[in-house]
């Protein structure tokens, strides 16, 4: 490694996400029964020495653990606490790590004693989420496994050459600020070789890019990654120019979009383009054109890379935005910037990513779609959501090689538009609105697409104005109608001015398609008001079934299309339903639930021979009355079967079954009788009135397995020997027991 120190080394703050809302917090306060939003309790591995303090570095203090306003108070030698009263007008996600600040430390080495895992390795940010308008303190109990040794020798990990240019002037800023610039070149870089030139990558938070000694949370390993790509002949290398962060980090990395407070992103971008790049091009062997110039960073660094790269497309041909803090500006401000871009020009290749373990991944799809909808070329956008990725240098170092390779290549991006939004705005004529009011039904107005499940509901804006939205694939063709619908009650369709049913198609070009629909009238319905009179002891009779889900319905042959009347009293039900004019309804009245299914009968208890019929003539109100004559009565039937002598092999057994009709349609679900004694088998079952047909048979079992034939036979090997039980003259108020004996002699 060639390590050229041009000026003294400087260490500054981290690249970890900063939330703008956190910056307005009310600051730290003392622990105890106070108005705190979060209380941190931490157990440390060993007692502090004289001059040492426990502090926190977090997005609520700009990741500055040397800020002693965030010092923990001692509970005992190993336990410390800190209470914070924050601005929780919106949900707040606090990311943090513990540090040990030693007397004499400065901002330059404030992370030298940061927390580590038990093996001394880096850990991911700790996270606690505080709900909006929090009223009770959230108590966090943490344990620190280990702190880094602030006195340990500094071990540099740079691979290749690193020049550190100290106090580089930033003339764009009126306060005469300066910055350390770290310029990395490959191992074989030769300043004298003016023929061999390299692409240039401009990056931020330079302390965390190349050297573990200058990073509090591990390094990006940009130097190792590019070196490995070169060794594998996957890259010819690059020069990486890292700009140190400072106490101005949040300001410099915040774009001047909208009215964002304290934003200095425009000045920072100008510094890179107008001052830093010319210096690098003059003093290093660079390829100066846009196709060989990249800007990249993470978190706030990703946001300023996005803003600067797209604002200067003539300078940057590649933009790498890792875990970008797109939550900092408002969506409106970001859209204003995106819509201001020149989409006729040659825009940069754009890489957008985030990890699934950070909320920033939720911005990848919206931002990429905003760009695409504005006109950004699809083949120049690459998006990635890392399922295991977190907001950390460790994750960014893993994703950097592939991102760098794609940005430097000519491969097409992988962008796929998100689902498009279709908005339907509907206007009713006064005639249509008046007709709906006259129906007096609380029902859904749907943009009907052929399936009730996928049809969006219109929201009522006023008496004549409605709006509906649905998401579809971009370019999808949607067929639709207008449907006023309530299950089992009403279904009418919108009509145009010609009296034709509105039926049209919309093609969803782009990601936001709007259609306007005018409804002049609706198809007409008739209102059926049907009183259903039931036998006087119906309630008393039904109570014996103990089925709370059971109810009376008008069964039309399909439960889905049947009607569900409302109970008025013990003998009357009422059905109000809307049907098409001149409709004939065929039905049977059914008492139906999870345990019972009883159809109505004639006066003598026999089954209905035909369906009941009600005809609804014309439009408007049609009043009808229907009387139920009786209900089916289940009868307790005791069945005894005496089987003939059957010889079966030792160790086997037989099951005697009643097969068919009410006993099961196959031997697998037939009624198995209980063996009483000798050759006698019996069962008691509930059967409906009427005639029941069945077959008596048996199955031979070899151990616990049935015989290979799996068949039911009588003693003569016949399967279809049927017997009938006819139930007549039963008393509907008293359940009757019938006894039926079957002699094995009947097999002959």
Image: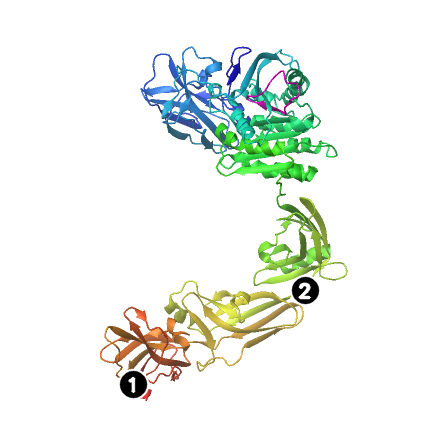
Residue at the spot 49% in from the left edge and 14% down from the top edge: 108
Element type at marker 2?
loop
Q: Give the range drawn in magenta.
A: 187-205
| Residue holding disc 2 | 524
* x and y percentages locating residue 487 in the rendered image: 57, 61
Decide: is 125 above or below 101.
Answer: below
- Distance between the alpha carbons at the discs numbered 2 and 1: 66 Å
Viewer-proximal residue, 187 or 514? 187
Q: Is residue 192 magenta?
A: yes
In reply to whether residue 218 is colored magenta, the answer given is no
Q: Considering the image in quadrants, where does the C terminus appear?
A: bottom left
Q: Which of the labelled discs sits on residue 744, or is there none? A: 1
Q: Is 704 above or below relative to 316?
A: below
**Upstream in sequence: badge 2 or badge 1:** 2
Residue at 48% across / 35% down in the picture?
Answer: 357
Q: Is mark 1 on a helix, strand or loop?
A: helix
């Amino acid at each position: 490694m060639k390590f050229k120190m041009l000026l003294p080394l400087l260490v500054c703050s981290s690249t970890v996400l900063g939330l703008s809302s956190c910056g307005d917090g009310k600051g730290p306060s003392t622990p105890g029964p106070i108005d705190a939003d979060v209380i941190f309790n931490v157990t440390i591995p060993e007692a502090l020495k004289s001059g040492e303090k426990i502090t926190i570095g977090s997005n609520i203090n700009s990741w500055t653990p040397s800020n002693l306003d965030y010092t923990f108070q001692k509970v005992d030698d190993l336990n410390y606490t800190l209470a914070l009263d924050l601005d929780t007008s919106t949900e707040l996600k606090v990311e943090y790590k513990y540090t040990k600040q030693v007397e004499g430390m400065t901002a330059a080495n404030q992370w030298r004693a940061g927390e580590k895992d038990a093996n001394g390795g880096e850990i991911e940010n700790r996270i606690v989420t505080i709900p909006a308008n929090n009223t009770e303190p959230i108590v966090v109990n943490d344990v620190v496994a280990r702190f880094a040794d602030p006195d340990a020798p500094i071990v540099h990990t740079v691979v290749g050459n690193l020049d550190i240019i100290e106090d580089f002037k930033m003339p764009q800023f009126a306060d005469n600020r300066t910055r350390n610039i770290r310029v990395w070149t490959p191992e074989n870089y030769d300043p004298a070789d003016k023929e061999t030139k390299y692409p240039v990558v401009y990056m931020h938070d330079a302390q965390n890019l190349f050297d573990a000694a200058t990073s509090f949370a591990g390094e990006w390993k940009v130097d190792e990654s590019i070196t490995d790509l070169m060794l594998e002949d996957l890259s010819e290398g690059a020069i990486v120019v890292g700009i140190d962060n400072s106490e101005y980090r949040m300001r410099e990395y915040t774009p001047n979009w909208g009215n964002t407070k304290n934003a200095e992103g425009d000045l920072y971008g100008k510094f890179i383009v107008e001052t830093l790049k010319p210096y690098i091009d003059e003093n290093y062997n660079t390829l100066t054109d846009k196709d060989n110039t990249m800007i990249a960073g993470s978190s706030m660094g990703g946001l300023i890379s996005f803003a600067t790269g797209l604002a200067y497309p003539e300078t940057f041909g590649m933009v790498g935005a890792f875990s970008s803090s797109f939550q900092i500006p408002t969506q409106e401000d970001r859209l204003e910037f995106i819509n201001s871009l020149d989409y006729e020009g040659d825009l940069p290749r754009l890489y957008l990513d985030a990890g699934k373990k950070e909320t920033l991944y939720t911005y990848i799809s919206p931002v990429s779609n905003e760009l695409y909808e504005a006109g950004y070329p699809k083949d120049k956008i690459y998006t990635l959501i890392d399922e295991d990725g977190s907001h950390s240098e460790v994750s960014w170092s893993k994703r950097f090689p592939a991102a760098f390779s794609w940005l430097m290549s000519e491969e097409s991006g992988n962008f796929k538009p998100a689902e498009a939004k279709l908005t339907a705005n509907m206007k009713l004529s006064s005639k249509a609105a008046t007709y709906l009011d006259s129906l007096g039904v609380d029902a859904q107005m749907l943009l009907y697409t052929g399936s009730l499940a996928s049809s969006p509901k219109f929201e009522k804006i006023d008496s004549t104005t409605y709006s509906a939205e649905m998401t579809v694939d971009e370019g999808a063709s949607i067929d639709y109608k207008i449907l006023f619908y309530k299950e089992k009650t009403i279904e009418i369709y919108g009509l145009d001015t010609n009296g034709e049913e509105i039926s049209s198609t919309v093609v969803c070009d782009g990601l936001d398609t709007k259609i306007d629909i005018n409804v002049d009238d609706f198809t007409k319905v008739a209102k059926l008001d049907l009183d259903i009179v039931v036998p006087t002891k119906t309630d008393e009779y039904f109570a014996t079934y103990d089925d709370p889900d059971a109810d009376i319905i008008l069964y039309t042959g399909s439960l889905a299309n049947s009607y569900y009347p409302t109970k008025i009293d013990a003998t009357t039900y009422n059905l109000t339903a809307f049907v098409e004019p001149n409709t004939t309804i065929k039905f049977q009245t059914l008492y139906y639930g999870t345990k019972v299914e009883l159809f109505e009968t004639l006066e003598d208890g026999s089954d209905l021979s035909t369906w009941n019929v009600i005809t609804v003539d014309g439009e408007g109100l049609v009043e009808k009355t229907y009387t139920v004559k009786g209900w089916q009565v289940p009868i307790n039937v005791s069945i005894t079967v005496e089987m003939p002598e059957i010889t079966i092999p030792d160790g086997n057994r037989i099951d005697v079954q009643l097969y068919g009709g009410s006993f099961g349609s196959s031997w697998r679900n037939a009624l198995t009788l209980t063996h009483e004694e000798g050759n006698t088998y019996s069962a008691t079952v509930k059967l409906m009135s009427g005639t029941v047909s069945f077959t008596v048979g048996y199955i031979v079992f070899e151990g616990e397995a049935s015989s290979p034939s799996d068949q039911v036979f009588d003693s003569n090997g016949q399967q279809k020997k049927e017997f009938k039980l006819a139930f007549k003259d039963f008393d509907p108020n008293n359940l009757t027991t019938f006894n039926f004996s079957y002699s094995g002699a009947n097999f002959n």
